[in-house]
Image: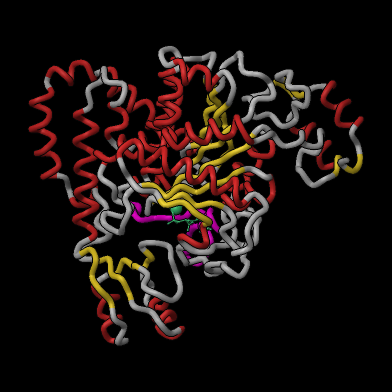
Amino acid sequence: MEKSERRERKEIEVIQRSRTSRTLAWCAFSVLLILTGDLLAQSPEAHQQRKYESHQVVRVQLSTAREMQTVSAIGAIPWSCRVGPGAPEYVVSPEQRDALVAANIRFDVLIADVQTLIDAERQENELAREGGIASDPLAWFTAYRTNAEVSIHMDDLAALHPDLVEKITVGTSHERRTIHGLRIASPTAPANRPVILLNGCQHAREWISVMVPMYIADQLVRKYDEDAQIQTLLDQIEFLVVPIVNPDGYAYTHDPDGNRMWRKNRRVNGGGAFGVDLNRNWEVDWNGPHSTSNNPTSDVYVGPFAMSEPETQAMRDLVLANPGIVAHIDFHSYSQLILQPLGYTSDPPADAVMLDALGAQMSDAIANVHNEEYIHGPAGDILYFASGVFEDWTYVTQGIFGYTIELRPKTFFPGFLLPPSEIIPTSEENFAAVLAMADFSLKHLTRRPAPCIGDLDHNGHVNVFDLLALLGAWGECASSECPGDLDESGAVDVFDLLTLLGAWGECR
Ligand code: 0X9
Ligand code: ZN
């Protein structure tokens, strides 16, 4: 068993043990609350991330290339990921702040002490975790959850409705963590049903982007039996939900020895540098005119080549293996925006009118829930242009209506550190957006043509590489994501081999 798998199993065992004792713990809840308060007060410093002590969030006035170079040279971490001229926000240490002053660069202090904000979020999260009422199905959504907790909740949903939910393995990260997904569809849904793909957490520190897709999956499953609208929907459409695309980065933001503000994955770049920005690694205008950085130490490093990362590869393969996907939301935070393709150019896409119509419908659906404003529009117009981004990849290469939704909050405060009390309202309004997307998909969107059967590596040919891939996967399928199983019999066998040989050559 891999080290990371052992680690996840161990985490799961600990959670399960604590679950067994939850009933007892609940009887002693009031005592526990007092104790929890005490423990938090007494926690040894060493067991908490204290990386951002005396760090501030500042908005820097940058007008010249020289000023931009200076900010980059002092190693300030972008708080938002808007880089370039204008007034971007950065997290700075006291030394970096002094360096800005020395370089005569003007800035405003937006957050006086980042560590205080991180501590407050952690404290609120721990209290919510301990205080949840076990019988309340929404208790799980009162606190941010770890990789292991998310994995268990997925198992629970599959156990609750095995006919409706399948937990799938989407891929494996750099540090050998499993990227889990859920396939949710009623057994009576037609085989050619449209599919909606939802994912979160390309960016590790954007914790709310994990909870929102989990909430949507949870509600679809729980409401299926009691809500006629959901039942009708799941009888016609399928959902694929991947809440954590970047499990290594996510683990690092939860790790006491890690970094709550980590954005990238955890590729070892050499020279002490880690991570690729997964949302700059997609093969669409990769490293193009709106590229961010080729420097492996940068927070927005695009990677050594397009699709270089196992996490982007896994999501690509999931999309390619599911030609039914017609629409997609890549959840991020923060800003409350619905970003439509194209995000790398101001050229309007062929489907500009329809993309905008769905953007508007999702924005209205969100506003109807808690009166929150999520502005919609082409990504480059309402946020910034960027090269190598997921939403453009799904639209440009697959014709999928791909969106990025930037979740709550609206502004830099509290930015990525959204209090856990906002998980449920944020999820509720975005559930409404997804229902609007499903309605639109059923009315207006059609599945892509079936892929070239046998072309397992999607290079336009059925050749010896596909043959080797099929032979390598020979035998029973471990999960429904089983690319060599061409006839979907549950095994890669001689029938699949014959199909592949029959399709030999260039794809038509
Ligand atoms: O920069 C990103 O990857 C996303 N914003 S975030 O603050 N969550 O990092 C937005 C990407 C949206 N797409 C384009 N701007 N093209
Ligand atoms: Zn993001």
Q: Position of residue 381 (x, y in %)?
A: 50, 62
Give yes or no for residue 280 being in the magenta stretch. Answer: yes
Q: Residue at x 62, y 25 (%)?
A: 479
**Prevailing SS of the magenta stretch:** loop
Give above or below for 61 relative to 89.
below
The residue that appears at 60% across and 43% down in the rendered structure is 401
195 or 233, nearer to the observer: 233
Q: Residue at x 57, y 68 (%)?
A: 290
**Whole-percent x, y for residue 368 in the image:** 35, 37
Q: Is residue 252 at least partly visible in the picture?
A: no
Front position in the image: 179 or 289: 289
Quadrant containing the C terminus in the rendered view: top right
Residue at (75% x, 33% y) in the render: 472
Is residue 106 found left or right of 325 in the rendered image? left
69 vs 145, left or right, is: right
Question: The magenta stretch spans which residues?
Answer: 257-281
Considering only vertical position in the picture, is 261 above or below 169?
below
Instruction: For residue 43, say whether it is visible.
Output: yes
